[in-house]
Amino acid sequence: MQKLISSKTNYYLLVFSFLIAGLINAGNPERSKNGMVVSASPLASNVGIEILKKGGNAVDAAVAVGFALAVTYPTAGNIGGGGFMVIHLADGTNTTIDFRETAPYAAYETMYLDSLGNYNAQLSQTGWLSSGIPGTVYGLISTLEKYGSMKLADVIQPAIDLAENGFMLTYNMAESINKYHNDFIKYESSKKIFTNNGNKFKEGDSFVQKDLANTLKLIRDNGKEIFYNGIIAEKIVNESNKNGGIFTRKDFIDYKSLERKPVIGIYKGYEIISMGPPSSGGICLIEALNILENINFEKQQWHGSTHIHYLAEALKRVYADRSIHLGDSDFFNVPIEQLISKDYANKLFTGISDTATNSLALKAREFNQHESDQTTHYSVADKYGNAVSTTVTINSAYGNKIVVEGLGFLLNNEMDDFSAKPGAQNQYGLIGSMANSIQPKKRMLSSMTPTIVLKEGRPFMVIGSPGGSTIITQVLQTVQNVIDFNMNIYDAIAAPRIHHQGLPNQIDYEPFSISDDTKSILTGKGHIFGKELSLGRMEGIVIDIDNKIFYGATDPRDYGKAIGF
Ligand code: GLY
């Protein structure tokens, strides 16, 4: 189907017309018998599938894909950032790995405010002050050591080869890098790698990253210690000192990824296994599903006015809670159990009427508007019954655009995910949240929602997306599309989506996602329509458990690949 599409508009039109016509099989997912890897980078998906073919498990493949994405998808794949991994093991274990970045010890609550107390976005989004302590290397390696079956040298080697030998830039990769040309040329270290001798890249250019290959070799030969208490940490801290940053060796020595209990909910008999704090993703997804469970969607038309009304109303309530209650639970008391309880959701549901609620009445508080959508998700499932759902990020596209001199990788600007001005009134006169204030060693709140859905205790769906604050709503709708509207995973991902995050009090929507008739009914109920935009980039797997068939789909909004074997 993708080959038939000449533009994004045609794609939306095609999908929409299929869906409206009730022709559910608008597209076909990739199909396989022994495993599936789906990521935003075809090269990285291929690395993962080769690991599965060698007998590796889903964790081995997920770690290999993680390192490969740092080479082939530097937009968001990284070793200079962080992420979250949700794991289901064949023995029934459900667990999560939190390798989110931490604030440096020298960070403080008002560090991004100027002398007049005004928030300075430049400081939290660009330059060395914008970076948290990277967690990816710790997270990937400690997960491999505990749950993998292969050696680090074997799973990291494909990434080293891709960096050392280079790969051909596709049109889209070249365009993506060139979009930030003016940022990259500001830093000699970045110009060296992300420009073609100072010029823009062209489709077909070879993209070689020798410094990154050497860094990955150091990690291969010495493990995570070299990144956190060795030459790599030393070089990063030296560069930070030279360039106005606040990193110290102790920040790196003390960094640890954390294994945390997942948040778990039940939706219409399916178990939802997702990421808890410091991500808001899992809690918000489960809270929204619990509210929506009160509706029998089988009797509702997909994206009819009832469907959109309840989606929007549920999301307003969820994002109101997010803005007040969510932050790093090691620093702030997050009422997790209450937020994901059925009783609480049922109470919220009884507050939903036939007309739109004003988000301000829900005491929703506006949160970080700069949350970036340049993150990336990948999904892996193996023939042994294991599944891994991973979302990684350096926040903005190419993070803060700073390559660490001599090390070849980009740094994150994840500090921008903190609430930079807690306690201050926003434009609505509401108080910003302390839950996500900046504190040394604290992890900034995320919306990443890597999720595994279980059916009868076995992996049924592995899903996630980039999209900043919209990640939660995109994952929610894709889960609903599969469970409530019986779509195959390709259609579930391809179907146009909407977004509501409480404040601004508006429904944002993809082209052709809502018909004019439906819009006018919803406007009559008091809903306000906001931006028309593209939402999310899902990478998903659905498993036919009885017939042991893996179905994978990458989002047709982007250029990733589902590969099975
Ligand atoms: N930086 C995007 C997120 O963590 O949600």
Image (spheres, rainbow, N blue to C red):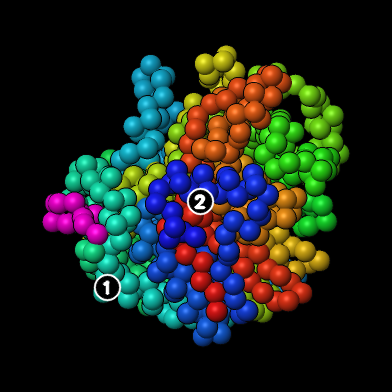
Residue 542 vertical position relative to residue 530 in the rendered view, above or below? below
Dot 1: few (<14), some (14–19), or many (≥20) neighbours within 10 Å?
some
Picture quadrant of residue 43: bottom left
Q: Which residues are magenta?
A: 194-203
Q: What residue is shown with label 1?
A: 164
Q: Nearer the viewer, residue 530 or 255?
A: 530
Q: Position of residue 496 (x, y in %)?
A: 57, 44
Q: Residue 198 lies in magenta, yes or no?
A: yes
Residue 217 vertical position relative to residue 255 in the rendered view, above or below? below
Q: Residue at x 38, y 30 (%)?
A: 121
Q: Residue furthest top?
A: 429
Dot 2: few (<14), some (14–19), or many (≥20) neighbours within 10 Å?
many
Number of callouts: 2
The answer to whether residue 234 is visible is no
Residue 537 is left or right of residue 184, and the answer is: right
Mark 1 residue element:
helix
Q: Residue 207 lies in magenta, yes or no?
A: no
